[in-house]
Image: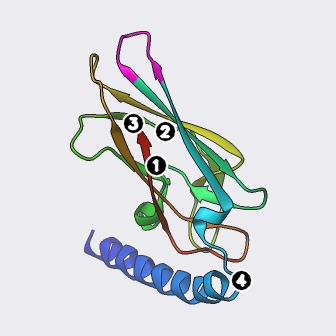
């Protein structure tokens, strides 16, 4: 399927260029960033299986969305919501996204409103943990620059 790969590469490049053109005036002209429209927090708990459970809460401002994980469209994988835990073996469980039917870009999934992402660390894991959360906020007309937020649990 070489033709399909080329099409995806072209679409991904075009999308990245369009996002750059659209976000520059929004991010710099109005002062909004993805971090401004999404409140993030993390709470610690213990799962039933004894693993250390971290609940990452996202509060997405009304009218904005994030690309879900999975995004449901390979061309949007680079901007999907993701959590990494550097240096740790972590299991991340993302919520199901809302399906969007888009004849131009293709179908994809988004997060809106309040969302919770579960991060499980091995049983007995103690001490501080840093989580790196990446996401991109968009409304119906504009996308803001992607965000990289570090959350810490002590």
Image point (21%, 43%), residue name: 87
Q: CA distance from mark 2 to mark 4?
A: 31 Å
Q: Label 3: state its secondary structure.
A: strand
Upstream in sequence: badge 1 or badge 3: 1
Task: Report the coloring of the rendering.
Answer: rainbow
- The residue carrying mark 4 is 30
Along the line of sight, the residue nearer the viewer: 49 or 39: 39
Q: Earlier in the sequence, mark 2 or mark 4?
A: 4
Give the Cα separation between the discs numbered 2 and 1: 8 Å
Work out whether 2 lies above or below 119: below
Q: Earlier in the sequence, mark 3 or mark 4?
A: 4
- Image quarter for residue 130? top left
- Residue at numbered disc 2: 94
Q: Residue 9: horizontal and vertical position, in percent?
A: 35, 77
Asked if labels 4 and 2 touch by Cβ distance under 8 angstroms, the answer is no
The picture quadrant where one finds residue 144 is bottom right
10 in magenta: no
Closest to the observer, 70 or 101: 70
Q: Residues within 10 Å of mark 3 (few under 14, many from 20)?
A: some
Question: Depth check: 110 or 8 in front?
Answer: 110
CA separation, marks 1 and 4? 30 Å
Q: CA distance from mark 3 to mark 4?
A: 34 Å
| Residue stretch rendered in magenta on the structure | 45-52
Residue at image location 56% in from the left, 90% down from the top: 21
Q: Can residue 51 be found in the magenta stretch? A: yes
Residue 70's label in the rendered image is 1
Q: Which residue is label 3 attached to?
A: 92
Residue at the left extreme?
87
Q: Residue at x 61, y 53 (%)?
A: 110
């Amino acid at each position: 399927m070489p033709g399909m790969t080329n099409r995806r590469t072209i679409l991904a490049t075009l999308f990245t260029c369009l996002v750059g053109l659209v976000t520059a005036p929004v991010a710099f002209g109005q002062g909004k960033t993805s971090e401004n429209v999404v409140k993030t927090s993390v709470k610690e708990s213990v799962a039933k299986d004894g693993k250390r459970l971290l609940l990452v809460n996202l509060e997405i401002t009304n009218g904005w969305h994030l690309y879900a994980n999975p995004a449901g469209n390979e061309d949007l994988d680079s901007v999907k919501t993701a959590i990494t835990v550097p240096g740790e073996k972590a299991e991340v469980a993302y919520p199901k996204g809302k399906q969007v039917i888009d004849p131009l870009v293709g179908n994809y999934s988004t997060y809106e409103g309040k969302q919770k992402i579960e991060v499980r660390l091995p049983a007995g894991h103690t001490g501080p943990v840093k989580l790196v959360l990446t996401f991109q906020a968009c409304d119906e007309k504009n996308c803001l620059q992607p965000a990289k937020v570090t959350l810490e649990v002590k």
